[in-house]
Amino acid sequence: MKLRYVAAALLAATALADTAEAGPLDATGQWSVTSRGHAPLPPMGWNSWNAFNSDVDEEKVLAAAKALVDSGLAAKGYVYVNIDDGWWLRRRTSDGRLMIRTARWPSARGKDPAGSFRPWTDKLHAMGLKAGIYSDIGRNSCGQAYTAQFAGQPEGTVEEREVGLYGHIQQDIVLFMGEWNFDMLKVDGCGIRAMSPANPLVASGQYRALGPLIDYETLPNTDIAAVRALYTEVGEAMDRTRPRGDFVYSLCLWGSADVRAWAGKVGNMSRTSEDISPNWERMLHNLDAASRRELYAHPNSWNDPDMLFVGTGAFDMDHLVEARSHMTLWAMLNAPLIIGYDMRKASSALLSVLGNPKVIALNQDAAGNQAVLAYDGETVQILVKSLADGTKAVAVLNRSGIPVDATLTAAHLKYRADSPVALTDLWDGGERAFTGEVPVHLESHQTLLFKASGTREHPGGLYLSEMPGSVNPAVDGVVHPMADPLVHRGLLPWRSTRGDGEHSVYGGWGGARADATPFAQTPKIAGKAYASAIGVLANSRIEVRGNGAATFTAEAGIDDATADTSARVRFSVHADGKRLLQTDWMKRGDAPAMIAVPVKGARIIELVAEGNRAEMQDVPVTWGKAALDR
Ligand code: GLA
């Protein structure tokens, strides 16, 4: 086997001809995660939906706000107090202004019967909190589409009940973020998903038809560009209204419309799945929809597996093991920590789960790295999160309802097997140490959580898979979004096991991965397996923050998992837009290209894998041992 050594010398920059239009694989020298809004760390707070659904009023929400302050949770970071569905009465047709259900929001009453939330947001701000509100990108809301029997549904004529943003984006955003001064806006998508002409609610004349732009079950039927354009328009209206960028824009598309590919360019957090419910299986479902998207979460744009259900049902205080697991997993995922509990009832046990400062600190760690799956099993999963101080957090999850024994190894942590690894249990404070490996016993549904330190396997720097918050697959090579089969079919309470169940629906299969191929295999080039790698499809461009490193090294090639022996891929590395090297065209089975290039001073390094055909959906490539060294 002939090893291919690529010169580390800097090649002359290839300036694009003035006339040439930049293609998606052309290096930009830019970090393309949005700078809109402000969410350098995952937002934390409370939302009314899980506690009250749309049966929401000022008394309940104010009680939650007060409880956040009085319990000390606000001081620990839980500052957003978000009103979800149910606040609106109707849209006034004379001027299009949204009217508040002031019968339930006394402080919103004023001379204008439409009411104003300004006194409400002023009150929250005076308490040191921030205020969030809810809308929908279509003409109608999720409540109108799916829970019309719930309280707080809009009233009046068809037109008056059109409370969503569609056709009113600029006007409503100025109202929410300007006049009313909210700090966070969640934008749901039911109005462009549910209001098809065939919907009985539409056919019977209760609502106007719209689209649908989203076909939840059948990805190719979704008009991705139209959905993205609408959400972008909202973001731009927010920028105009709040030019200082002091807001959070939360996308709620439940993983549909290929939102994974573009959420990072549009908003600050993005739902990865359908709604969580307070049972163990559904929590796992929401975990699964986010846990393999570790390269799609970055400071200022996070994966959102939905709000916490800690305190309720399978996560109530009679199920502390499950409550801690849920909290641990959301912290490790860098999920926004949004409490969904009636805080008037919060016990000290609940507050100690939600308020564990060490667990919160993981979620709020400055490096912004979502945990990576170091072991991805049906029963046990091991998640490792690299922290800003150079240490790691590791969570060992037992998904099953029976006790299991597992083994945590130094290799899971990318630590050396011949020197001791120190573990501190972040729930009970217990300390232990091991060398090589350690047996761990897990009770049913238990997640053990440790902070770990040891001797790094790769002492010179960081593998890219240890810094997912600084690695952005700006172009991930996915041509036709497909549902992720690893997000298992769940049992929906209203559907039970009728029919053929709930299918995988969240587009995401084939996305870029840390320490795995896009199709969840061990990365391999010409028979050599890589424990540390970035796996991505051909025709991809990955942005990496330079973070002060001196050298980029990798072993690059077509992954052995590709069946397409006619595919050819060439790899290039760029620093701040200038090409440093390009390999020859490579085929499956070729030995990896050994790359080592100086990147000192570079802000953005780009890794491009260019295929010889425009559509190469199924050609995984591997950047083996990809690392930035000091
Ligand atoms: C959707 C969202 C939920 C909640 C409800 C409100 O289902 O996913 O989070 O906002 O709408 O109706």
Image (cartoon, rainbow, N blue to C red):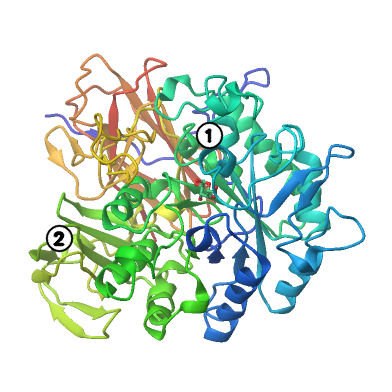
Residue 374 in percent (x, y) is at 22, 55
Residue appearing at x 11%, y 29% in the figure: 1
Residue 231 in percent (x, y) is at 63, 37
Residue appearing at x 38%, y 15% in the figure: 613
Numbered tag placed on residue 401 in the rendering: 2
Left or right: 170 as drawn, with respect to 301: right
Q: Which residue is mark 1?
A: 27
Left or right: 466 as drawn, with respect to 263: left
When the figure is inspected, residue 3 is found, relative to residue 605, above or below; the finding is above
State the CA–CA distance, disc 2 to disc 1: 48 Å
Instruction: Name which of mark 2 and mark 1 comes first in the sequence.
Output: 1
Queried on whether the Cβ of the residue with tag 1 lies below 8 angstroms from ligand 1, the answer reads no
Front-lying residue, 351 or 360:
351
When the figure is inspected, residue 71 is found, relative to residue 165, above or below; the finding is below
Res 15 seen here: no
Residue appearing at x 21%, y 40% in the figure: 523
Numbered tag placed on residue 39 in the rendering: none
Left or right: 118 as drawn, with respect to 206: right
Q: Secondary structure at mark 2?
A: loop
**Residue farthest toward the right in the current orientation of the protein:** 111
